[in-house]
Every structure is written in structure tokens, then in C-alpha cells.
Amino acid sequence: MSISVQDEKHLRAALELAREGIALCSPNPAVGAVITDKDGNIGGTGSHRYEGRKHAEVLAIEQAGSRAKGGTLYLNLEPCSHTGRTGPCTSAVFDAGIKRVVAAMPDPNPAVGGRGFEQLRGAGVVVEVADGELRAEARRLNESFAKFIQHRTPLVTLKAGMTLDGKIAPPPGEQDSPTALGIAGASMGWITSEEARAHVQTLRHESDAILVGVGTIVADDPLLTDRTELPRRRPLLRIIVDSRLRLPLESRVVKTAKDDVIVFCGFAEESHKRELESRGVRVEQLPLYPASWALAAGGRPVKSSDSRPDMRSLAKRLGEMEITSLLVEGGAMINWAALSSEIVDKVFLYYSPKILAGTGAVPSATGEGFRRMNEAAHVKNLTLHRFGEDFAVEGYLKDPYEARLQVVPAPESRTGQIYEGV
Ligand SMILES: NC(=O)c1ccc[n+]([C@@H]2O[C@H](COP(=O)([O-])OP(=O)(O)OC[C@H]3O[C@@H](n4cnc5c(N)ncnc54)[C@H](OP(=O)(O)O)[C@@H]3O)[C@@H](O)[C@H]2O)c1
Ligand SMILES: [Zn+2]
């Protein structure tokens, strides 16, 4: 692979154009394209938007016109080789007479997966693929697409704001009833700094959906909106998991709902469900955990009142809704439900240099917890961030690019075989 300093500059520009598609391209990948003419001058650029349909390379080719002939195409992602909502971009590249393609990474879509590069090479186009820092940045940009396109479930990020000793809130205050709304964070005093909280807004902006447990609604009455004021194609889907539909009608999420709030429950009392729906809140029932699991495994039936919406079914349902990224924002019980069901791909944990101590303060995750050190969730590939006096740890529990492992029963054996990337 030989890419020059000039190539790197144009590839970086393509990556920046791709970033302009954040929140506008989902469920498609973020793609940016730059075309230089045969003298190395920029002839055209493009950035993909889902609504605009046209892929970034096609937009750049259209803008470049005859200047594309004999030129180079820079892209953060391999051009598509299949017909989806549009024709394959590889054909548009040959037709334009482009001689060289420099891309930052292959397409994780199993329908493309290297075939775009192969087709280009087969047609005599020189193809170069970057490595190192540029490739790492390109992979980071489209990690939710990579997860979604291979697994059909969203990339799940667990976010929490904590004290140095891992507490996400001071001891809960006295509440009159389990559905009485508590005091919002601002008046209680925030754990993290303004800088850290501003960064959480960018995480929300990059996400298709946000999720909390009904306990957090009751305790903090949060709005759960994307307040970056940057454009987005679909409103941030606000999700509340609430087994028995105790979501207060006077909560701020309900009061501001405009078809962008969905409650996943186990049981829905008809009149409360209708009340919520009349306020623009969607209500959906999900299979219950552990009841449905125990039954499926042939185990003793579990009382359904001990059960709660199953988080894996939830992730699957969000995939059906073309939600490619989900930010789980707590609280303590939901954090454990997400971790123990193994739906979490990555964490973004913000730490403020404060210590709450005590047994009454709310820990980052409650529930049973992992019982042994070798069972603990192991966060890998860490990046540290600074936000004022706070810091954050970003890291992965799973590699979003890892191909799906599927158990397919072998014809003459009952043990089944594992096939990669089916
Ligand atoms: N610092 C932070 O980043 C942060 C973020 C969020 C919250 N918090 C704090 O966390 C505290 C609230 O935590 P919490 O644990 O009480 O509330 P929570 O985790 O937000 O909600 C827990 C409730 O969710 C419902 N639920 C529905 N499906 C569930 C499932 N599959 N698994 C588990 N629960 C499910 C349960 O109520 P039902 O049985 O009625 O369904 C459960 O009581 C507050 O003090 C808040 O300030 C801090
Ligand atoms: Zn394409």
C-alpha cells in the first residue's frame, strides 16, 4: 500500500465530509468522497444523506463531471458493489473513467465485504486501502453501522456519570409514592462538570435512541433529548423500560412526547396505555425475562410478576426499527440488566473527582453482579478523555466489527456447527 502525504490529506477531507452525515445517514453508513482530477486538483466532493439517497461517490462524480476522467477517488469506505436503494457505485466509478481509488477501510456489510474493491481491480482501477490512524478513525465513525449490518441489532453504549468511587447518585430521597416524581439533577447538584455533560449531548446526537429505566424517570424526571441543535433525520428515540406501565403522565418525557417516546413494558393496563398513547407515547409489550427463558429451557415456570422486559428482545426489536445505535443512560438496575444480558458493546464512563462514600449512595449497577473476577465484564481498547476536571473512559466489551457467529444445526448432527459471518 502506498499512499502519499497528498493522499492522506484528501482521505482526511473525505472523512470530514463523512462526519457531516452523522445523524443524517442512519441506518446507512456515514460516507464522504473527494475526487481529484489527473493534475491532483479537487474536482468534486460528496457526503451521503439517507434522505438524499445518492451515495457520496456518485455526488462527487456528478460534481466533478469530465474532471473525474483519469482522476482519483478518495473515500472513507469501500464503494458498494450491490444494488440496494441505488445502483452499485463501482459501476459509476468505471463509467466516470476514474483510474485510482483510495479508501480508508473495507465495507463491513456482508453484501459488499471486499467485492467492491475486487470489482474495481478487475476493471483495471488501482485500489489502495489505508491503514494506521486513518483506518482506525474510519472504523470508529461507522462502528454502529458495522454492528447493525452484521447483527441486525444496534451498537449499545452504556453511559454513566460517576463519582471516583463509582456512585451514580446520592442516596435516594424520601418519596411519597413509587411514582412521585423526584427532583431533576440541576437542583440536586450534578455529579459531572458542564464540559462532560456537553459531551454527553454529542453522544446523544450520534445515537439513534436513548434508554433509561422507569426508576430514573421517577428519580430525576429527565428530558432525554439531543440538545446539540445540530440537524438530525430522525428524532432521538426516547425509550423507557417499565414492566407495569407506572410511567407518570406528568413526567417531562410524556409531556414532550411527539411520537419519539416508546415504553417497553411487560403488562399494559389498557386505560393507562390509552392515556399514554393519546399523549403521543408508543407502548409495546416485550417477552419477559426470566419467565420466557425459563419456560423455553423447559425449566420451572417463574411467576410473571417477578419478570421484566427482556433486554435481548428489546435490542432485536430496535434492530427491526432500523435503530443502529442505542445509548443506555441508566440507572443502576437498568445498567445491570444491560450488562447481564450481554447486549452492551461499549462503555462511556465519566468520572468526576468527588467521593460520595456510604452504603446508601446509588452504585453504577445493582443486581447480582458478576460473582468472580474472571466473570467480570472486561473493557478493552481503552481511550481516556479529559473534560475540565473530569475524565472519561471509553472502551469496548465487544468488537462491533466482529462477524456474527450463528449456530446452524448440521444436517446429520444434533450438536450444531458455528459458521462465521453468515
Ligand atoms: N449518574 C448517572 O449517570 C445516572 C443516570 C441515570 C440514573 N441515575 C440515578 O440512578 C437512580 C435510579 O436507578 P434505579 O436503579 O432506581 O432505576 P432504573 O435503573 O432507571 O430503573 C429501574 C426500574 O426499571 C424497571 N425495569 C424495566 N425493565 C427492567 C429490566 N429488564 N431490568 C431491570 N429493571 C427494569 C424496573 O421497574 P418495574 O419493575 O416497575 O418495571 C426497575 O425498578 C437515580 O438515583 C438516578 O439519579 C444516575
Ligand atoms: Zn454506493
Image: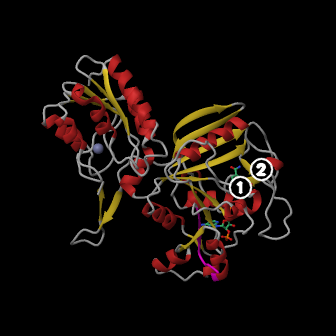
Question: What residue appears at the point 57 percent right and 60 percent down from the top-left corner?
Answer: 260
- The colour scheme applied to this rendered structure is secondary structure
Instruction: Say if 279 sits above or below 143 in the image.
Output: below
In the picture, the quarter occupied by the N terminus is: top left
Left or right: 24, with 247 as reference point = left
Tell me the tag on residue 191.
none
Q: Residue 36: x percent and y percent?
A: 29, 23
Instruction: Say if 239 sits above or below 27 in the image.
Output: below
Question: Which residues fall within the magenta stretch?
Answer: 261-270
- Type of amino acid at the residue the image marks with label 1: Pro
Residue under label 2, please give it: 185
- Type of amino acid at the residue the image marks with label 2: Gly
Element marked by disc 1: loop
**Location of residue 189 by image quarter:** top right
Q: Residue 89: x percent and y percent?
A: 25, 42
Q: Residue 248: x percent and y percent?
A: 73, 68
Question: What residue appears at the point 56 percent right and 60 percent down from the top-left corner?
Answer: 340
Residue under label 1, please give it: 222
Crowd tier of the residue under label 2, counting other residues whose Cα lies within 10 Å: few below 14, some 14–19, many 20 or above: some
Q: Is mark 1 within 8 Å of ligand 1?
A: yes
